[in-house]
Amino acid sequence: MGMNAVYRGPDDCPSVIPVFPLPGALLLPRGQMPLNIFEQRYIAMVDQAVKTDRLIGMIQPDADSDPNSMIPKLYSVGCAGRITQLAETGDGRYLITLVGISRYRVEEELPPVDPFRRCRVSFEPFVNDFTARAGETEVDRAGVVKALRDFVDAAHVKVDWRGIEEAPNEALVNALCMMSPFGIREKQALLEAPDLKTRAEVLIALTEIELARGGVSSDSTLQ
């Protein structure tokens, strides 16, 4: 697929993609994720992606997998992103930006033939991801903003409130989820929420739990 590709549905996506296991990294449809690529296996992954369809599957290692394993078990759901920006640093690294396309479900991991991992995946369970701003009218925007205000007050951080007010519901909810300081399991719950309304509800609930626990501090900044 060439420049400025448009993904209208699962049929526009490949059935096999390279995957980038990264704990705590949450990519959502139409979200932007900057990445600093320095490990050789992931340099090779980017090189391969650029030669083909520029798609990379972000995914988290399963929080219950053996932390000492060289090949940790993966969660069954990730999100594919397309490389939209790439810069060489001159010291062997890549600085890239991924834009989220759709979530996918892992059907099987393929035998290793490259330095990086590859999976056969299905985008069919997440067909609604291809429709921008789907379900926005059902989002409790006031509840999301209140949860954000409570978090900001507890953590003593600054946010661009004008940008918050102007952001559409999908962009607001997904950006806050991606920037949230939650752990692996919580990030996975946000990823696997069936729709935008539910994702917003999970975000509000997780924020309220953290505030109740007193786990929010000036170190808990939005990334």
Image (cartoon, rainbow, N blue to C red):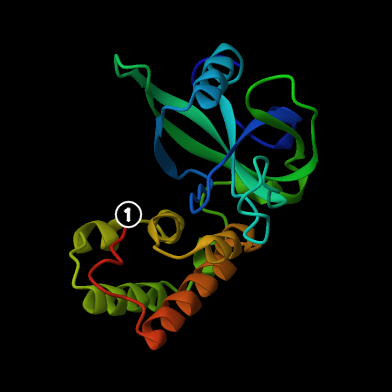
Q: Is residue 44 left or right of residue 116?
A: left
Number of numbered tags placed on the structure image: 1
Q: In front here: 2 or 213?
A: 213
Work out whether residue 109 or residue 53 is closer to the camera in this orientation and state it: 109
Image quadrant of residue 5?
top right
> What residue is shown at x 30% (from left), y 19% (from top)?
89
Q: Looking at the figure, which quarter contains the N terminus?
A: top right
Residue drawn at x 76%, y 38% is: 121
Farthest-out residue, front:
68
Could you say where residue 51 lies in the image, as x and y percent from the top left?
A: 57, 11
Q: Nearer the viewer, residue 161 or 80?
A: 80
Which of the pair 188/145 is nearer the observer? Answer: 188
Amino acid tagged 1? Gln
- Label 1 crowding class (10 Å Cα cut-off): few <14, some 14-19, many 20+? few
Locate residue 148 relative to residue 74 in the image: left or right: left
Does residue 51 appear left or right of residue 172 in this picture?
right
Residue 3: give x, y in percent of width and height.
50, 16
The C terminus, quarter of image: bottom left
What residue is shown at x 22% (from left), y 78% (from top)?
Answer: 153
Q: Which residue is mark 1?
A: 223
Q: Is residue 33 above or below residue 75?
A: above
Q: Residue at x 45, y 60 (%)?
A: 177
